[in-house]
Amino acid sequence: MTDPRIDPPFIAGEREMLEAWLDWHRETLAVKCAGLSDEQLRERSAPPSTLSLLGLVRHLADVERAWFRGILMGQDAPPRYKSEERPDDQFEAIATTTAEEAFAAWRTEVANAREVSADLSLDTIGKGLRHGSEVSLRWIMVHMIEEYARHNGHADLLRERIDGVRGD
């Protein structure tokens, strides 16, 4: 498996460091899914969990959307894959989802996140609220790194279970 990730710098300014780590983690998700069929990407971790690599891609598309469109920009950006009535559809409703569709949605949200945040200061306060509180772009970026790091750990285990491939 090829690894197109670029290692984050050891020494850099805060913005460069945060962007590098977030991009590294974003690309790690793609690496964990690379070379697998739609069927393999739909494989669940272990009963009763509905966790799958395809579900993680859908979930992280919604997470990118919520934080960068909703909280940072204050846009009306409902989730693509879940609703109040079906909060787990990101993971459960994957039977007919294709990797192409899920990755296109995820890449769209990642591109939007990069675009809307590119010229903003890390001290920029989002136009939306999270649990009634204001949130800075810096906090969003740190949270996104944490979100990806946690889910990439899940992706490590899922990938190893599917075909034995392990790695960073």
Image (cartoon, rainbow, N blue to C red):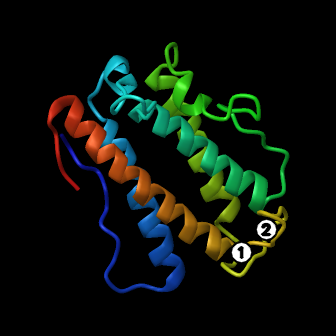
For marks 2 and 1 on the same chain, the one whose residue lies earlier in the sequence: 2
In the rendering, at what x and y percent does residue 121 appear? 69, 78
In the shown orientation, is residue 112 left or right of residue 26? right
Residue 53 vs 155, above or below: the answer is above
Q: Secondary structure at mark 2?
A: loop
For residue 47, the mark is: none
Residue at x 34%, y 44% (from the top left corner): 155
Residue at x 84%, y 57% (from the top left corner): 74
Instruction: Single out the residue that lies furthest toward the front.
Output: 48
In the rendering, at what x and y percent does residue 12 appear? 41, 84
Instruction: Please tell me how crowded label 2 is: few (under 14), some (14-19), or many (20+) other residues with Cα within 10 Å.
Output: many
In the shown orientation, is residue 114 left or right of residue 22? right
Residue 95 vs 106, above or below: the answer is above
Residue 4 vs 136, above or below: the answer is above
Q: Amino acid at mark 1?
A: Ser
In the rendering, at what x and y percent does residue 75 appear? 84, 50
> Are the residues tagged 2 and 1 within 8 Å (C-beta)?
yes
For residue 136, the mark is: 1
Q: Secondary structure at mark 1?
A: loop
Instruction: Identify the residue under disc 2.
Output: 126
Quadrant containing the N terminus is top left
In the shown orientation, is residue 64 left or right of residue 97? right
In the rendering, at what x and y percent does residue 89 appear? 61, 28
Dividing the picture into quarters, in which one does residue 61 lie? Answer: top right
